[in-house]
Image (spheres, rainbow, N blue to C red):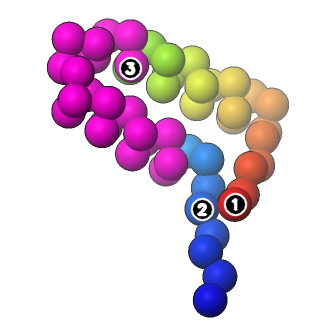
Amino acid sequence: MTLHLELLPLLAVIAGIAILIKPKLLNYIVAFYLIAIGLIQIFNINIQF
């Protein structure tokens, strides 16, 4: 059995869980998520687990 995970969906799940746990951090989590996605797509980073 092979498990194939990509970075962007993993970041989305982590951000969603963090928002559910600490809703007051929503602005920081969204900002970090958008910056991370932007950098990943600019530099075409393909991290697969």
Q: What residue sits right under mark 1 in the picture?
A: 49
Judge whether 10 appears above or below 5 on screen: above
Q: Tell me the kind of residue under disc 3.
A: Val
State which region is magenta.
9-29
Residue at horizontal 32%, vertical 30%? 18
Amino acid identity at mark 1: Phe
Location of residue 5 in the rendering, given as x and y in whole percent from the top left corner: 60, 62
**Mark whose residue sits in front, 1 or 3:** 1
Picture quadrant of residue 22 = top left
Mark 2 or mark 1: name the one nearer the start of the chain: 2
In the foreground, 18 or 48:
18
Q: Residues within 10 Å of mark 1 (few under 14, many from 20)?
A: few
Q: CA distance from mark 3 to mark 2?
A: 21 Å
Between the residue at mark 2 and the residue at mark 1, the CA separation in whole angstroms equals: 5 Å
Quarter holding the C terminus? bottom right
Is residue 27 shown above or below 19?
Answer: above
- Residue behind mark 3: 30
Give neighbour class at mark 2: few <14, some 14-19, many 20+ (Cα, 10 Å).
Answer: few
In the image, which disc is placed on residue 5?
2
